[in-house]
Amino acid sequence: MNFPSHVNLPTDAREELIDSLNTLLADAIDLHWQIKQAHWNIRGRHFYSRHELFDDLAKHVRKQADEFAERAGTLGGYAEGTIRLAAKNSELPEYDLKAVDGDDHLKALVDRFARYGASIRTGIHRSDELNDPVTSDLLTQTLGEVELDLWFLESHLHGEPRAGVRRGGTSGPRTPPPAPPTPERSVDHRKAPARLLKSKRAGGLQRIEGVLSRRRTPF
């Protein structure tokens, strides 16, 4: 169903743009509830921060869905935004209902956000080809938001260094640094001759005492 519109675009171009926007609307509604599924069911480490992150992301996608629907209406289209229509028209896969651990939810959402972003990028190219800069600009701004949120999700998966792993990819215990060399005893060469002379004098006295002792010995 379409409504009258005086937007200066050919009818066939407007109809194609409306179809594209309705597909993105379905994706956004589906993604919003998939994020809420993760928000409600996450458990494990970093529960609170991820629980709050998912809620923020759901708000972003809900706003994007509203903008898709309003642009479709501006072009004279009928926004197909019920849950059942979204389930029918969404191009996203069903959510992983076995996900419980935080990383499992993150991986599922990274995949959905990547697919969602790819569809928006395709819509940008097609809007440019149909000479609709307004829709192209809307989708370009939305894609920037989606890719920023995707970065936040991916950073939770790849941001923590593992124990024992250093930069460069090497692992294992560190090699202890070599022990410092033992300092040599300093010798005062000025005192060496005096020691030597004293030693010689002591030896000479011992020899003289030996000779005198033999002379005093009676025959």
Image: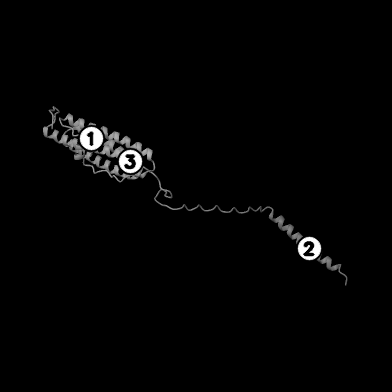
| Relative vertical location of residue 142 with respect to residue 96 in this rendering, above or below | above
Position of 175 compared to 94: left or right? right
How crowded pointer 3 is (Cα within 10 Å; few <14, some 14-19, many 20+) is rated as some
The label nearer to you, 3 versus 1, is 3
Instruction: Look at 85% across and 68% down and name the residue there.
Output: 215
In the foreground, 108 or 162: 108
Can you tell which of label 2 and label 1 is closer to the viewer? Answer: 1
**Residue 74 location (% of width, % of height):** 17, 29
Tell me the distance, in whole angstroms, between the alpha carbons under discs 2 and 1.
110 Å
Q: Residue at x 26, y 39 (%)?
A: 31
Secondary structure state at the residue bearing disc 3? helix
Which of disc 2 and disc 3 is earlier in sequence? 3
Residue placed most toward the observer, 179 or 183: 179
Q: Which residue is mark 2?
A: 206
Total numbered labels: 3
Residue density around tag 1, few if under 14, some if 14–19, many if 20 or more, within 10 Å = many
Q: Give the Cα separation between the discs numbered 3 and 1.
A: 31 Å
The residue that disc 1 covers is 139
Secondary structure found at label 1: helix
Q: Earlier in the sequence, mark 3 or mark 1?
A: 3
- Residue 146 higher or lower than 3, as above or below: below
Q: Disc 3 marks which amino acid?
A: Asn
Q: Residues within 10 Å of mark 2 (few under 14, many from 20)?
A: few
The circle drawn on residue 41 is: 3
Q: Residue at x 38, y 40 (%)?
A: 47
> Which circle, 3 or 2, is nearer the viewer?
3
